[in-house]
Amino acid sequence: MNTAHNIPRIAIILINLNGYEDTSACLTSLKSITYPHAVVVVVDNGSTDNSASRLRAEFPEAMHIQSAENLGFTGGNNLGIEYALRSRFDHVLLLNNDTIVTPGFLEPLVARLESDSSVAAVSGKILYGPAAKKGRSNVIWYAGSYQRWHMAFNHRGLDEIDTGQHDTPSVVAYACGCLMLMRGGIIHQIGMLSDDYFIYWDEADWCERARVAGYQSYYEPRSIIYHNFRSSNLGMETPFHNYLQFRNAFIYAQKYYSGLKRLRFWSFYPLVVLYRLLQDLRVKNHSGAKAIIWGVLDFFRGYRGGQGLREHGLIKS
């Protein structure tokens, strides 16, 4: 192991896209972490404001990588992962830029990963940031994951008050990309995040590839961070969100479901699509409803990654 005193070297990767306020707050919180061998890698994903230059000036201790265009969550993180592997880091941590970490959040993740060579990825307990829940800091956003009846996934504990009910470490369907420690050796073995997705479902895809290769993903509740997630009411999600969530669900199912799983997905998941479409129409979110339809149709057109986003005006050219 290429470490000092056998402590794994961790590359912490954040993606910035015109998000100075969130990214700077996250980087400030990372200055207080107690883990001794971590380097922060900031990937600027084609920002068009001056956030990249401001972050370089204010956080010179971080490694800054510049992308000429928006490569999505997958492409941006893959730039950081490539750097980490070239630089011989042992493991890679994906961390959303709109998070605030606690000082000791990283040690439990590393301990869990290092305790068992069959563990490919680990996530911790992710609570909503106080700003997202009117000052409350005990509302759960992620406490593990599970597969639902329609074959898509859900966060365990979502919107529950945290009273310790999810404080048992466990194997999960996938580790959440908001806070995901990935074993470096397994990245070498199975590859980086899939470019099929752009964002959403990509971490589930990586964890599934790891599972097929004989590994598992874990939830470690001793690791705690806060996510300043701006949630939308059902039916009011953005067209960007709707397009990629639903298109990518079909991509994932096509890649990994066979036999009874495939039958179950195609029997029930279209009902979820119809329900969500009707919800958007009910609240007059017509752009969101159109994006759901575009996403499903573009799956059948073979669109992958960023294809379709500019065509439908969902990201800027």
Image: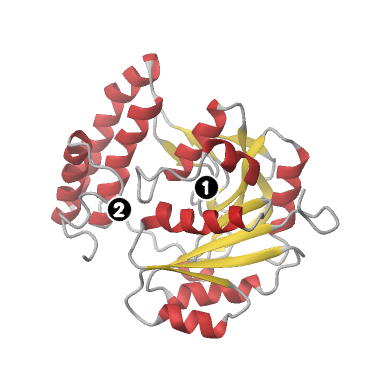
Up-down relation of residue 215 to residue 103 (above or below): above
Q: Residues within 10 Å of mark 1 (few under 14, many from 20)?
A: many
Q: Is residue 85 left or right of residue 308?
A: right
Up-down relation of residue 93 to residue 247 (above or below): below
Q: Residues within 10 Å of mark 2 (few under 14, many from 20)?
A: some
Along the viewing direction, whichever of 10 and 3 lies nearer the viewer? 3
Q: Position of residue 82 (x, y in %)?
A: 53, 54
Along the viewing direction, whichever of 267 and 279 lies nearer the viewer? 267
Question: Which of the 4 quarters of the picture holds residue 67?
Answer: bottom left
Q: Position of residue 315 (x, y in %)?
A: 24, 62
Along the viewing direction, whichever of 157 and 74 lies nearer the viewer? 74
Q: Identify the residue position indicated by label 1 in the image.
A: 176
Q: Position of residue 180 (x, y in %)?
A: 57, 50
Q: Position of residue 206 (x, y in %)?
A: 49, 39
Secondary element under disc 2, as helix, strand or loop, is helix
On-image quarter of the C terminus? bottom left
Question: Which of the 4 quarters of the picture holds residue 269?
Answer: top left
Q: Estimate the spatial distance between the alpha carbons at disc 2 and disc 1, rounded to whole Å.
A: 17 Å
Q: Is residue 76 left or right of residue 309?
A: right
> Total marks drawn?
2
Is residue 66 in view? yes
Mark 2 belongs to which amino acid? His
Mark 1 belongs to which amino acid? Cys
Q: Is residue 261 left or right of residue 58?
A: left
Q: Identify the residue position indicated by label 2 in the image.
A: 241
Outermost residue on the top side: it is: 259
Residue drawn at (74%, 36%), measured in percent from left and top?
A: 116
Residue drawn at (73%, 44%), measured in percent from left and top?
A: 112
Q: Is residue 152 left or right of residue 212?
A: left
Is residue 139 in view? no
